[in-house]
Amino acid sequence: MKVLSKTDYILYRECPNNVWYKVHKPELYYESELSEFEKAIIETGNEVELIARQLFPTGILIEGRDAAAQELTKKYLSEEKLTLFQPVFMVDGFLCALDVLKFNPEDKTYSIYEVKATNSIDDKVHFHDLTFQYNVLKKLDYKVKSAHLIHLNSEYVRSGELDIIKLFEIEDVTPAIEDLSEYVLNEMDQALHYVSAEAKPNGFCCCIYKGRSRHCSTFKHSNPQVPEYSVHDIARIGNSKAKLLEMIDGYIYDLKDVPEHIKLSDIQRNQIDAHTLDRVLRHKDKIAEEFESLTFPLYFLDYETYPCAIPRYDGFSPYQQIPFQYSLHVLDSEDSEPKHYEYLCTDPCDPSNMFAESLEKVIGTKGSVIVWNKSFECGINKKIAARLPNYQALMDAVNGRVYDLEDIFTKQYFVHKNFKGKTSIKSILSVLVPEHSYKNLGIREGGTASQSWNELISDETSAERKNQIISDLKEYCKMDTFAMYAIWNSLRKIL
């Protein structure tokens, strides 16, 4: 019989087929590299757990998951060591390592602590994770007194040295775990039986009823009948479960086969019509009306930020974005050439003040500030203003001048089949201005930019690597603002 780890159990709950591939055909499961976003989640989780261990200063770390680690766990438990980090347990084919296991000598019981790198509890995932551990210990006849979830405190604001006690919240969720225990135990048995089967699972995987962004890593192997561009790519179809269910149960995968009777939103119907009829939808009057609201000079502005889970500087809370870079293209008149300005922090210090000071010198006091997804840039400006009151007037003024160029596409004033229902700047640029592309850049998306900056300011990064990162970051951010200008200019020409 195969072994079911806690991680694989959580994967099973998301998609049984996917975890079967992970166990039996790992070459297929791992054929797609982790995205920078996924890598960042893993690194963040490790960082938060390391910091959280400071809540238990006498803890002993057990490394590895093998038989030796399991034996060492038993040895320390027999010696009644008070706190263990990553103790490993195996029973009846179930394997898990606990973040923290605390021995209570007064009544010879144990308390489990699971560390989550989140600002809140997700009871649909975190409770099952913790209950798996609870069940394994119960199977081994350890008396579990309590079960706790440790997560970041979103209300904590750093001031001076990191306050570990205030940084984290420890929530006793024992009653919920006890109530869930039997259900999870049955699910654990089902999952172990499932992954132990040598034969490939029949039929499609459960992800076929989810939108594209929630598909598992082996989706194409479990669902070969689904085309690369399918009904799963219809905008926000993942939020329209009944519509997607009706189509999938009717074996409708291609957008060309979507029946008229299915009630779709205007955005969804426009996407399908553009694809099936090869029709470009242009509301020139609406676009012209939007552009007439703009005032020269035009400032095409973009920020890059780093969402640090553990507040690195004073005034920051968990996951509050650190603004480390901006790019700005300034267009004085309709027919002039854009001028470029930029700022990039290359030192391991809070860049907020230098960022705002640099921006103040080039943003001007009049003219429209054009961004892509204004809630992001405006949100960063508000946070800067809250940390730096002397720049509140500047940030408020900039926010009052912001125009979101993405609105042209979210409002459906321009719809092209090759947008494929997306309104990201890269999707639009590749269609309207294909001669400009991110493909040859060293950095091609925001997640990589964020992680690269974190690498840039590390003492462990070589000078040569730092120089490369600086060059790549500048090219990437510059492309974002030039892309906005190029898209604006392309739209202007069709009016």
Image: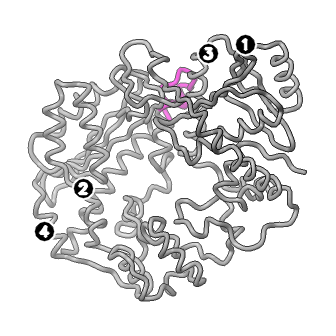
- The image's mark for residue 227 is none
Q: Which mark is nearer the camera, 3 or 1?
A: 1
SS of the residue under disc 3: loop
Estimate the x, y position of residue 204 in percent, counting from the top left. Answer: 69, 71
> CA separation, marks 4 and 2?
14 Å
Q: Contact (CB < 8 A) between labels 4 and 1?
A: no
Estimate the x, y position of residue 127 in percent, counting from the top left. Answer: 60, 42
Residues in magenta, as a range: 454-469
Q: Amino acid at mark 2?
A: Asp
* Residue at horizontal 37 percent and vertical 79 percent from the top: 269
Classify 65 as above or below 9. above
> In terms of secondary structure, what is the magenta stretch mainly?
helix
> CA separation, marks 2 and 1?
60 Å
> CA separation, marks 4 and 1?
73 Å
The picture quadrant where one finds residue 12 is bottom right
* Residue at horizontal 53 percent and vertical 45 percent from the top: 37
SS of the residue under disc 1: loop
Residue bearing the label numbered 3: 56
- The image's mark for residue 105 is 1
Q: Could you classify mark 4 by the number of other residues whose Cα lies within 10 Å: few (under 14), some (14-19), or many (20 or more)?
A: few
Q: Amino acid at mark 3?
A: Phe
Residue bearing the label numbered 4: 289
